[in-house]
Image (spheres, rainbow, N blue to C red):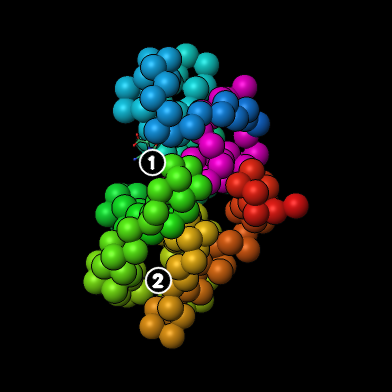
Amino acid sequence: MIKVYGVHGSPFVRKVFIALEFKSIPYEIIQQMPFSGDKEYLKINPLAKVPTLVDGDLTLGDSKVICRYLESAYPEPALYPKDIADNAMADWYEELCGNQIAELATGIFFQRFMRPFAFKQEPDEELVSKIIEQRLPPMLDYLESQIPAEGFRFGEFGMADLSIVSPFINASYAGYEVDRSRWPSLAGLITRVKEQPHVAAVLGREARAMGFGK
Ligand SMILES: N[C@@H](CCC(=O)N[C@@H](CS)C(=O)NCC(=O)O)C(=O)O
């Protein structure tokens, strides 16, 4: 059975869990905390980041690489658009939202959630304000220009939508919600993605694992 090293709450691990659920692929979670300094884990992922996926002899790091592998190995139901240009755009959103935008949105989560609860440190609210007021808005303006007012980016729900939304789920755990009056399409997409059955199932397990749920 496929093994996923990681923990609930990571925006990157979440993408992999949802991709596996969406494709009805059985998997086992091997609990692996990020920032743990676990030397054994470096043997399978020298970046020490989660997730890592093991499928038989194949060991892969990076959520984007993993999700692309899952799409090739288990093509139906599809998570990426068939059209070549749309397919490339889906990669672009995954790249942008998995790097610069994730850094900002999960920066809020890191300061307000991880620092107090995991590291017993005060959050840097000055940094959080800078992210919210200066650094995120141009990115949100761009996403707003890309997202339809209704439905999903490429018609059916897919990895593009999940990649865009996943970092904002973390920001919401830290009290940040995308302003619906300023970025209505993005805020609407966040709601619609969270309502998708496979996403809702993973988020429910995530809430329980993080102590938010029953
Ligand atoms: N590009 C990677 C990013 C993964 C990542 O940054 N994971 C975080 C947890 S959310 C991590 O493991 N951080 C530990 C570290 O940077 O040492 C992916 O898409 O999988």
Q: Residues within 10 Å of mark 1 (few under 14, many from 20)?
A: some
Q: Is residue 75 visible?
A: no
Residue 152 is one of the magenta-drawn residues? no
Badge 1 marks a residue whose secondary structure is: helix
Q: Which residue position is annotated with label 1?
A: 64
- The amino acid sitting under disc 2 is Ile
Q: Residue at x 33, y 58 (%)?
A: 124
> Looking at the image, which residue is at 43% across and 78% down?
179
Q: From what the image shows, is residue 43 above or below residue 35?
A: above
Position above or below: 109 against 7: below
In the visual, does 51 lie left or right of 2?
left
- Between marks 2 and 1, how big is the CA–CA gap? 20 Å
Towards the viewer: 60 or 127: 127
Whether residue 120 appears in this view of the structure is yes
Count of residue discs: 2
Query: Quick one: label 2 or label 1, which is nearer the N terminus?
Result: 1
Whether disc 1's CB lies below 8 Å from ligand 1 is answered: yes
Seen from the viewer's position, the closer of residues 157 and 185 is 185
The amino acid marked with disc number 1 is Lys
Indicate which quadrant contains ligand 1. Answer: top left
The percent position of residue 121, horizontal first and vertical second, equals: 40, 48
Residue 69 higher or lower than 110, as above or below? above
Q: Which residue is mark 2?
A: 147
**Residue 10 lies within the magenta run:** yes
At numbered mark 2, what does the secondary structure look like: helix, strand or loop?
loop
Q: Residue at x 29, y 74 (%)?
A: 133
**Span colored in magenta:** 1-25
Q: Is residue 104 left or right of residue 15?
A: left
